[in-house]
Image: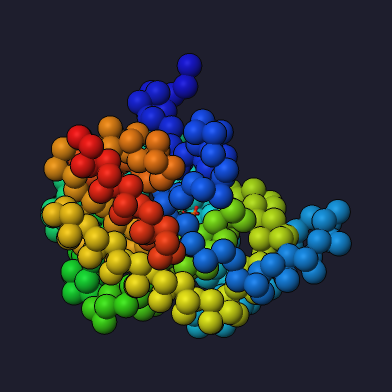
Amino acid sequence: LAQPGVQKLSPYVPGKPVEELARELGLDPADIVKLASNENPLGPSPLAIQAIQSALPELTRYPDGNGFTLKQALAERFDVSPAMITLGNGSNDILELITRAFVGPQHEVVFSEHAFAVYPIVTQAVGARAVVVPARNWGHDLEAMAEAITPATRLVFIANPNNPTGTWIGRGELEAFLERVPEEVIVVLDEAYTEYVEDSDMPNGLDYLSGRPNLLVSRTFSKAYGLAALRVGYAMSNPAIADAMNRVRQPFNVNSLALAAAVATLGDVNYLAESRLTNRQGMLQLEEGLQLMGLSWILSRGNFVAVDLGREAAPVFQALLREGVIVRPVANYGMPNHLRVTIGLKRENQRFLEALTKVLASD
Ligand code: PMP
């Protein structure tokens, strides 16, 4: 039998695959719109595709297990030393590595209600106790989270912005929290969506690394950099934390095509700018459409928005599937009345808005 914490977990539920729905509906996969997994709707950077093609002849070789070139590129970009960087098979891998390296069954891990679904998974997988702090206005209540820290607390997860709510934490609030956290508690600042945030008050986790040996900033190539399929995430932290994570890491956790594509995409500043622009415009389009429908939503700084249907969302999710539109129900996040919609291309957003209008009208 699995250990007690694991028995209480529900598995992570990914977005419904396009091919599966296309087959169910007897449609061409090209006619399905998937706005369910916070993916980048642009397709990958052309430089990533070129880099993968160049790396293909080396498929018989193991990847560079230390990710030398990618670490160098990240170190230059973010002005940190390579010894501060840990590479992961997606940032989910980073979240697991930090927990495996530092947390045991005697520990508590603090995170917010409505926060990213992987936090309870990695916590309970190591037999630790998850301390879930009630949210405030759907977002992290950092004061309450600081108060939830006990001598047994080993780690705190903070998502900024958070998924699935899109809520974010300003500079002052984050700084006040970091000041309160005891040094022996590791703070994982999950910045998976940070590249989308354009507010001047948005803190950059990297600004807080110096003098804070207990802080880890986690980021990913899956969102604004458009490489979700390849699974590349990275952490920046004190070298001592990176060293501990390196001890429990699978030797070749990031494959060579992923490493090559990540280096290439990191150098493609135009791609990042286009990702941001598409997201900004798509967010406005969705917000305007939702407003016209009289619906409300949680103000989001991610590449997605949680729409409040004012009633149970599951049947609406199912009806949208029948229209060929895949979004994400978030009842498993304690949000049974919301649907999370990823910002897509203009025509995809339009398809979603039309389908939602139709589904809600046919009630
Ligand atoms: N953190 C947050 C807040 C996320 O929403 C996600 C993606 N759903 C991740 C981390 C992990 O993404 P990946 O493993 O693709 O880097």
Count of marks placed on residues? 0
Residue 307 at x, y percent in the picture: 23, 51
213 displayed left or right of 311: right
Q: Quadrant of the C terminus?
A: top left
- Eyeballing the image, is 6 above or below 76? above
Can residue 298 be seen in the rendering of this structure? no
169 displayed left or right of 117: left
Query: Residue drawn at (48%, 62%), measured in percent from left and top?
Result: 40
Residue 164 at x, y percent in the picture: 31, 51
Residue 220 at x, y percent in the picture: 49, 62
Can residue 268 be seen in the rendering of this structure? yes
219 displayed left or right of 164: right
Q: How are the residues colored? A: rainbow
Query: Residue drawn at (73%, 71%), measured in percent from left and top?
Result: 50
Front residue of this view, candidates 200 and 184: 200
Query: Residue drawn at (51%, 48%), measured in percent from left and top?
Result: 31
The quadrant holding residue 105 is top left
Query: Residue drawn at (59%, 53%), measured in percent from left and top?
Result: 229
- Eyeballing the image, is 139 above or below 46? above
Front residue of this view, candidates 327 and 289: 289
Q: In which quarter of the image is ligand 1?
A: bottom left
- Eyeballing the image, is 323 above or below 274? above
Residue 84 at x, y percent in the picture: 52, 70
Front residue of this view, candidates 59 and 211: 59
